[in-house]
Image (cartoon, grey):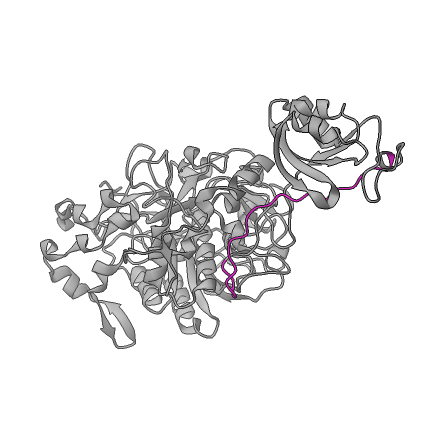
Amino acid sequence: MTRKKCGTRGDVRQSALWGSGNRGGEFRSNALWGKGGRGLATFIGVLAFAVPLAATAAAGSGAPGAPATSDVSYVSQTLKNKAKTSPDAVVKVIVQVDQLSPDAEKAARKLGSYQRKLGLINAFTMDLTAKQVEKLAKIKGLIVTEDAPVKPLGYSSTQLWPHENGVAKLWGTDLNPGPKAPTIAFVDSGIDTSRLDFAGRNVTTVNMTSLPGNSAGDGRGHGTFVAGIAGGSAPGYAGAAPNADIVMLDVMDDAGMGLTSDVIAAAGWIYDNRSALNIRVANFSLHSGSIGPFYNDPLDRAVEKLWFGGVVVVAAAGNYGSATGPSGVRYAPGNDPFVITVGAMDLGGTAKINDDSRAPWSSYGRTYDGFWKPEICASGRYMVGPVPLSSSLAALRPDKLVGGGYMELSGTSFATPVVSGVVAQLLARFPALTPDQVKATIMARARAVPQAAPGSCGVGQLNAVRAGTLPKDLANPNLALNRFVVAGADGPVFDAVSWTDVSWTDVSWDSVSWASVSWADVSWDSVSWADVSWATVSWTDVVSWTDVSWEDGAAADTLGLNGYELTPAEELAAATDPDLAIPEDTIPIP
């Protein structure tokens, strides 16, 4: 493991942030796992259409309620366009048949694959290539329209990521909203509360910044973006948990600078108010600028207090990764072994996972204490989120502005709130879960990142749908560490003395059954403690701001203002992906 030895000593930290992002479509499924035993709503294509007046005024009347006969069948313009642009593409259609044309259905069915009868309207559905639509138009007595996906009321996103990881299936609708998510606390740069993205919900803001130059609201823009990814609710830009309440602890000035002490003070505020405000998730899309063992680092100790106090801490891995090998995860709080550390992945522009990979700048590898990080990856490349147009982030990168107060950015800062939102969705359905159980659930139900190096995305990428169930052989990822958690004067604490005194050969790291989550290659018993020689690490050495600034690998990402848009084909692929269905080998979460 290598480490830069440069810069000046200090106690600053910054966001583990950004680059570019994406937009996409609006389809999403109904609510999942709400009260009353609601299950996963199966994707069903239902068409609402209007028959042009010309079609109903043609010669012949047919039976009451049936389409009128005509010498020329009606084919929707959408299908005609598809036949010209993509003649070999398979399309789903609804074919209405004039009851006075008894041979029309038989002739039409020869052109494609018959699916089912819709007797209520004397129609049927079929699949066929687009070029066959022109032949359907020559059969007398038909009305042919596309079997289009339904777009229910409620939350929506034009981006690919909520559909690819399945969280769109947790959103619910206006009539069936699903359970209320708990409050998510963000330790960041503030939030623009005037935006539609956060309308109608309890948004609390607390200024914890001790540095001068911090304007009201979100002068930086980073906090608004992060909160939008986790909990935004604007049409077309819904976040992972769009019905969650939001607490924003402002710890950054308008330049994105802050002090570690401000972050610790923010963690203390969350701890003190967690019960009153139902704060169950704390998002840290930032990292410290100093290096030290986690059991001595004050920020690590602060987030552990939250963890032991029932708050799930989700932290960014950082953007100083390498495309050629592990960079390590060096800084608090992402280096803490208890918390959920998140890396960023690249979706490759499709809902299929065979082109997914770790973003090349996303940090991974061992901490200086020998722990492997991150635990999991989530979408973090080419994301689109809200920013105040008056913010310094918008002024710094005007080329990233999408329009309407949104930007396209990349970074582990934006993968982190994806996981935070899914954690909130999980706790909405199973509020009795402990942070250890949440971490186990998120990890146990991850799925592959085929193009990523082994371990570079931890156990894999986030699967929001399956994260709501537990395999029968679920392991506790913090089991070996919990033996060092003892009672303190004001709650549980990590016993650093016992930790440092123990012989590494006596620690049963392999008692954690990582095989149950397909992580055998990075099991704890494979840690070579001899490789983590404390004598070779100068803990008084502090990396300077410029060495760990948010203007690192992710800042150079440029895909285009629309990023990974959700196309109808990818929308359908995500909606029907069997890996985003509830698995059979599960038991209810206690």
Q: Quadrant of the N terminus?
A: top left
Residue 550 appears at what percent x and percent y? 42, 45
Q: Position of residue 434 (x, y in %)?
A: 35, 65
Q: Residue at x 64, y 46 (%)?
A: 150
Along the viewing direction, whichever of 202 and 265 lies nearer the viewer = 202
Horizontally, residue 389 falls left or right of residue 362, namely right
Tell me the magenta residue range.
33-54
**Is residue 48 located in the magenta-colored stretch of the structure?**
yes
Please identify the quadrant where the C terminus is shown. bottom left
Residue 492 at what x, y percent from top left?
27, 71
Residue 496 lies, with reference to residue 290, above or below; the image says below
Q: Is residue 401 visible?
A: yes
The reply to whether residue 542 is in sight is: no
Residue for point 80% across, 39% down: 51
Q: Is residue 36 magenta?
A: yes
Q: Quadrant of residue 215?
A: bottom right
